[in-house]
């Protein structure tokens, strides 16, 4: 359902309206530069001769769960509407309309907020509030133009006014109204729009960004982060063996931290005792098996001579890197 609100000056005189169709929302930029695009249509009411007005600036902010600062999603957006011949201006005897795409940049945590609001909404209809602010000005006088006065067939000319050549185009004196009001637009986004038009543009139909917390151990330098970054950089540079070998350094830090030994004192047994897991607890068995496989892969990459090394691929190194991050975050959580 199209949402519509009036543009008023001094909260009394209506000079136009703003409309937004939730079915037209879309996203662009993918996971690296995600943007939510909200198209709005501005229509200015006709005004009598000598009282032409224009919306010269439109600003908007997106909100979920209310209007306090924590509810805002992404930074506010402002659009300058003075250039390009005052596209949102009134003309005599007819409505004048112009479409504007408000583009909101989103960080990963803001995308997560939208996703949570979507999944918590009734019938998977996400409600987003678009708060708008505008500035309306009276085009008090315009130079370098021809204008018909009323219906008397009289043409008024201001061409060459002030010594300006007609080739410089029209120019106007602006008088700004002190108080411009646009009420909030409530947009109900249907499931089909969210799934078909928004998520693909954010890249969430193909990839999800994951944030993981990498710790410091024993209050020393951030060795885990440093060694993890070493593995990440080698992956980016195409050094897949070195990336996997660098993950061994992260594993070794954890084994030192817990004084663990994969044969006599496995880290899974140490954690099981701390967490009071029974002998047959599946978490204990999972951690033991995963750690064992992680140790074999990273040790082989570190110790085997180059001629005996299997042809590690980007997929192998990425798998090992993500496994390293997951295990590190899991140990911190425990």
Image (cartoon, rainbow, N blue to C red):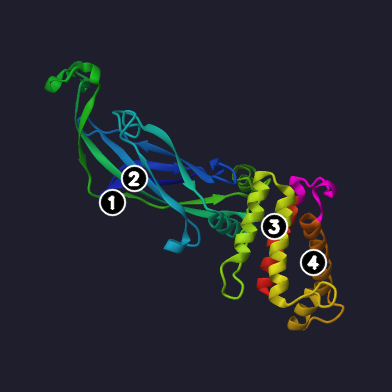
Magenta stretch holds residue 282: no
Q: Is residue 26 visible?
A: yes
Asked if the residue under mark 2 is in contact with the one under mark 1, i.e. CB atoms within 8 Å, the reply is: no
**Mark 2 → mark 3, Cα distance in angstroms:** 60 Å
For image coordinates 81% across by 51% down, the residue present is: 305
Q: Residues within 10 Å of mark 3 (few under 14, many from 20)?
A: many
Dot placed on the residue nearer the N-terminal end, 2 or 3: 2
**Mark 1 → mark 2, Cα distance in angstroms:** 9 Å
Residue 77 drawn at (x, y percent): 41, 47
Q: Would residue 55 appear left or right of 108 to someone viewing this image?
A: left
Mark 4 lies on a secondary structure that is helix
Tag in front: 1 or 4: 4
Tag in front: 3 or 1: 3
Residue occupied by mark 4: 291
Residue 172 drawn at (x, y percent): 21, 30
Q: Which range of residues does the magenta coloring cover? A: 304-316
For image coordinates 77% across by 59% down, the residue present is: 298
Residue occupied by mark 1: 11
Mark 2 lies on a secondary structure that is strand
Dot placed on the residue nearer the N-terminal end, 2 or 4: 2
Q: Is residue 130 visible?
A: no
Q: Is residue 169 above or below residue 119?
A: above
């Amino acid at each position: 359902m199209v949402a519509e609100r009036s543009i008023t000056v001094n909260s009394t005189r209506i000079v136009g309206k703003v409309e937004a169709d939730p079915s037209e929302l879309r996203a662009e930029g993918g996971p690296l530069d995600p943007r939510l695009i909200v198209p709005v249509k501005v229509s200015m009411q006709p005004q009598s001769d000598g009282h032409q007005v224009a919306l010269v600036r439109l600003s908007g902010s997106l909100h979920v769960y209310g209007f306090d600062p924590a509810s805002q999603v992404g930074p506010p957006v402002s659009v300058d509407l003075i250039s390009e011949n005052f596209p949102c201006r009134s003309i005599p005897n007819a409505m004048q309309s112009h479409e504007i795409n408000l583009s909101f940049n989103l960080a990963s945590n803001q995308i997560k907020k939208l996703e949570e609001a979507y999944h918590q909404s009734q019938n998977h209809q996400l409600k987003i509030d678009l708060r708008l602010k505008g500035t309306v000005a009276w085009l008090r006088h315009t130079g370098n133009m021809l204008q018909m006065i009323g219906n008397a067939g009289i043409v008024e000319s201001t061409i060459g006014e002030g010594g300006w050549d007609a080739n410089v185009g029209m120019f106007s004196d602006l008088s700004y109204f002190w108080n411009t009001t646009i009420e909030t637009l409530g947009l109900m986004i249907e499931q089909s729009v969210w799934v078909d038009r928004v998520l693909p543009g954010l890249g969430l139909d193909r990839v999800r960004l994951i944030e993981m917390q990498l710790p410091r151990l024993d209050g020393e330098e951030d060795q885990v982060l440093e060694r993890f970054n070493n593995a990440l950089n080698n992956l980016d540079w195409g050094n897949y063996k070195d990336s996997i070998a660098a993950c061994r350094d992260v594993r070794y830090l954890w084994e030192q931290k817990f004084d663990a030994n994969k044969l006599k004192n496995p880290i899974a047994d140490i954690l099981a005792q701390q967490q009071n897991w029974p002998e047959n607890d599946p978490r204990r068995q999972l951690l033991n098996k995963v750690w064992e496989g992680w140790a074999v892969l990273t040790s082989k990459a570190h110790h085997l001579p180059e001629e005996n090394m299997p042809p590690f691929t980007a997929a192998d190194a990425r798998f090992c890197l993500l496994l390293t991050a997951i295990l590190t975050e899991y140990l911190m959580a425990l």
